[in-house]
Structure formats: C-alpha cells, structure tokens
Amino acid sequence: MTKHLDIIIKGKVQGVFYRASTKAVADQLGVKGNIKNEPNGDVAIAAEGDSIALDMFLDWCNEGPQDAEVTSVESNEGELKNYRNFDIVKKSL
C-alpha cells in the first residue's frame, strides 16, 4: 500500500549534497516525490512509496550524505499526490 510522508530534515543539510544524495536513494528504493531547501536551512521532502521503502528512506534521511549533520527528522503522513518521479526542486528566483 502506498503512503505519503511529509518530511522535514533539520541540521547541517544544505550545501552538503543532501538533495542530490537523497534523490539517488529515492530512485534506488522506488520512492517518488520531491525535495527542496527551505529558507530557514531545513530540507523539506514529500515522499510516496510502500511502507518498507519509506522506512528505509527515513533511516537514510536520519544519516544523510557524508558531510551532513542531521539533528532531527520529522515526518507526518499526508494525502497521496501520486508523483511520477523523485525531483529536486530548485529555488525560484
């Protein structure tokens, strides 16, 4: 069964390839959705997949790439949006 999670990652998670690394992991696990940097320094993720994939994805989010320092991960279930891919959302200028 597919679930939707809204995830907020806090810590040193910008400028450490967090988004690109997360996309690679999401693609491997078959997780769909998107990831973006927030102005306050957090990273926000919308993720959809089955429970097992999402559990593995959340485990990875708690670690992040080598230079990241994750201090907390908050996740809440939300409404399915049926994403087709996992995308990195660039800042709109």
Image (cartoon, rainbow, N blue to C red):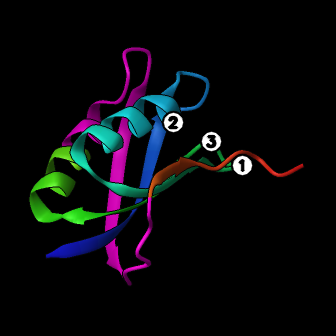
**Where residue 65 sits: x, y (%)?**
38, 22
Residue extending farthest front: 84
Q: What's the residue at 35%, 58% (across, down)?
A: 74
- Identity of the amino acid at label 1? Pro
**Bounds of the magenta span?**
59-84
**Looking at the image, is mark 2 or mark 1 nearer the viewer?**
2
Give the number of the disc on residue 39: 1
Q: Where is 61 relative to 38, above or below?
A: above
32 within the magenta span: no
| Label 2–label 1 contact, CB within 8 A | no
Task: Identify which residue, 91 or 14, lies in the foreground.
Answer: 91
Q: Where is 4 relative to 17, above or below?
A: below
62 within the magenta span: yes
Which residue corresponds to mark 2? 19
Task: Identify which residue, 74 or 37, lies in the foreground.
Answer: 37
In the figure, residue 14 lies in which quadrant?
Answer: top right
Q: What's the residue at 37%, 80% (across, down)?
A: 80
- Identity of the amino acid at label 2? Arg
In the figure, residue 66 lies in which quadrant?
Answer: top left
| Label 1–label 3 contact, CB within 8 A | yes
Q: Where is 83 relative to 19, above or below?
A: below
Which residue corresponds to mark 3? 41
Of callouts 2 and 3, which one flags the residue occurring earlier in the amino acid sequence? 2
